Image (cartoon, helix red, strand yellow):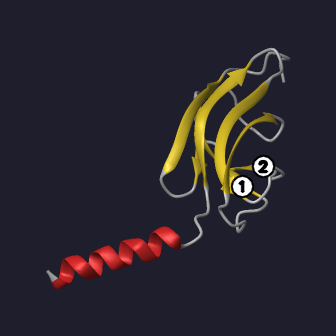
């Protein structure tokens, strides 16, 4: 019984702590704009978070595999309210195409998007 009470107290303490992070709701390739589009939900004190991508190395053989980490410029913002945003990322930073891109948001949250060859022939 005592262990159960301690677990409950720990859960309550954790629930009151500020939560950081964001979740990927949707991700897709916009062919017309040649962009990676990512819909996110995050908690914070303001709607002005800016997100960027940090590209990892490409695998050798096409279709390439590459990981892109989503970076929140206000990752330490207190989790007061929910915000939902749609971010568009140009693909100039992607060095290999076609590619299966795995988007990472934190250690466990991810999404996968196929990016075809560059339509502009680059």
Q: Position of residue 18 (x, y in %)?
A: 59, 69
Give me the residue at 58% from left, 36% from top.
25
Given residues 41 and 28, the one toward you in this image is 41
Given residues 114 and 42, the one toward you in this image is 42
Mark 1 vs 2, N-terminal side:
2
Give me the residue at 58% from left, 64% from top.
19
The quadrant in which residue 71 appears is bottom right
Q: Crowding at label 1, few (<14), some or many (≥20) Cα neighbours within 10 Å?
A: some
Residue farthest toward the bottom in the current orientation of the protein: 2
Give me the residue at 35% from left, 79% from top.
9
Answer whether labels 1 and 2 touch (C-beta < 8 Å): yes
Q: Position of residue 16 (x, y in %)?
A: 52, 71
Disc 2 element:
strand
Residue 9 visible, this angle: yes
Q: Which residue is mark 2?
A: 52
Q: Which residue is mark 1?
A: 71
């Amino acid at each position: 019984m005592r262990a159960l009470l301690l677990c409950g107290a720990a859960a309550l303490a954790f629930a009151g702590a500020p939560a950081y992070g964001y979740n990927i709701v949707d991700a897709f390739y916009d062919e017309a704009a040649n962009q990676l589009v990512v819909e996110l939900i995050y908690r914070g004190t303001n709607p002005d978070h800016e997100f960027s991508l940090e590209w990892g190395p490409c695998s050798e053989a096409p279709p390439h595999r590459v990981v892109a980490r989503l970076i929140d410029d206000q990752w330490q913002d207190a989790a007061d309210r929910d915000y939902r945003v749609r971010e568009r990322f140009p693909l100039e930073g992607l060095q290999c195409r076609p590619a299966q891109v795995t988007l990472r948001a934190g250690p466990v949250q991810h999404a996968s998007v196929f990016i075809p060859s560059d339509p502009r022939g680059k």
